[in-house]
Image (cartoon, rainbow, N blue to C red):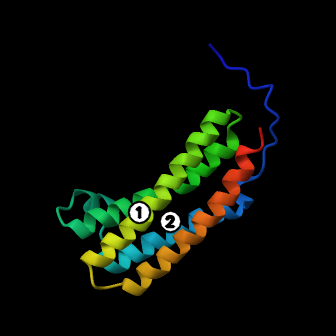
Amino acid sequence: MKKNYSRYSYRRRNVTKLPVYKKALYIFKLSRQVVEYIRGDKSILELHSSKIIADQFSDKLVMASLGLAPKIAMAEASADPSIKLESVSSLEKTTVALLHYCEKLELSHGQGKEFLSLLRKEVKKFGHLQNKWAVGICNKN
């Protein structure tokens, strides 16, 4: 059975121009650069299959940051309020997870603490942007 969303007032915005979307892309790029600095030129597959704890957290950091922008785009593109709320909730959990992965990497690897600190600051800024954006997107209905 197909849902009818015509009762929801909805205006589509250009997602790529949103500050929260731009910050999500920046966090992905920055996390990839931090991991490359800390773990060398290992590919994501090498990090994922590694038994080394720092490699596993590096993989989780990059993969979690990769998922930020698509979640924002999905919430923006959907007219269904439940999908918007689910995306916002998932973004909040991912933001907390990114901070956790930064902390674990800092504890497990002595090198690159200043870069991890920078990434952590950017993730916190993203959290603030994400909260403002979430209020706006949830009130669109």
Question: Which residue occupies 49% across, 60% down?
Answer: 95
The residue under label 1 is 62
The kind of secondary structure element at disc 2 is helix
Q: What whole-number distance in Å separates the C-alpha atoms at marks 1 and 2? A: 7 Å
Residue 126 placement (x, y as % from top left): 59, 66
The kind of secondary structure element at disc 1 is helix
Q: Is residue 118 above or below residue 65?
A: below
Q: Residue furthest top?
A: 1
Question: Toward which corner of the image does residue 8 lie, by quadrant?
Answer: top right
Question: Toward which corner of the image does residue 129 lie, by quadrant?
Answer: bottom right
Question: Toward which corner of the image does residue 87 lie, by quadrant?
Answer: top right
Left or right of 10, for residue 1: left
Residue 22 placement (x, y as % from top left): 65, 65
Question: Which residue occupies 22% across, 57% down?
Answer: 49
Q: Is residue 106 above or below residue 140?
A: below
The residue under label 2 is 28
Give, as a three-letter code, the residue at label 2. Answer: Phe
Left or right of 61, for residue 18: right
| CB contact under 8 Å: marks 1 and 2 | yes
